[in-house]
């Protein structure tokens, strides 16, 4: 069975396959910001998801906010 979401540090991300060109994309779920990511392969998609999560966590901390999810 294919994995339906990505999970990293408590964050969840969607996985969308474009049936026309077989590209992969997704969005970080359950947060107020719109954080998209994409990749040509599943490994690239997962890495870009992790980078989006890390960026979001860093931005929260820079604003003095606690990230919504913890490790």
Image: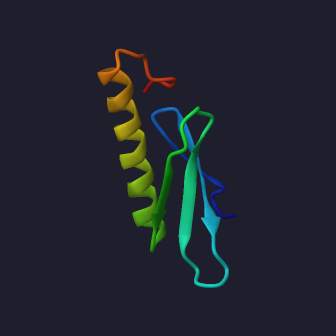
Residue in view at x 66 percent, y 56 percent: 4
Q: Quadrant of residue 56?
A: top left
Residue in view at x 63 percent, y 75 percent: 18
Residue in view at x 63 percent, y 58 percent: 3
Q: From the viewer's perspective, is residue 40 above or below residue 35?
A: below
Residue in view at x 61 percent, y 59 percent: 15
Residue 36 picture location, percent across and down: 51, 53
Residue 10 picture location, percent across and down: 52, 32
Q: Quadrant of residue 24?
A: bottom right
Q: Is residue 7 left or right of residue 65?
A: right
Name the residue nearer the viewer: 30 or 47: 30
Name the residue nearer the viewer: 4 or 60: 60
Q: Is residue 38 left or right of residue 1?
A: left
Q: From the viewer's perspective, is residue 43 above or below residue 18?
A: above
Q: From the viewer's perspective, is residue 57 above or below residue 65?
A: below
Residue 13 picture location, percent across and down: 57, 47
Mark count? 0
Q: How is the image coloured?
A: rainbow
Q: Is residue 23 left or right of residue 39?
A: right
Q: Quadrant of the N terminus?
A: bottom right
Residue 12 picture location, percent across and down: 57, 41
């Amino acid at each position: 069975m294919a994995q339906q979401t990505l999970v990293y540090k408590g964050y969840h991300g969607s996985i969308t396959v474009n049936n026309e060109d077989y590209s992969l994309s997704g969005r970080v779920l359950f947060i107020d910001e719109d954080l998209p990511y994409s990749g040509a392969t599943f490994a690239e998609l997962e890495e870009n998801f992790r980078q989006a999560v890390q960026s979001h966590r860093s931005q929260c901390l820079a604003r003095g906010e606690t990230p919504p999810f913890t490790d």
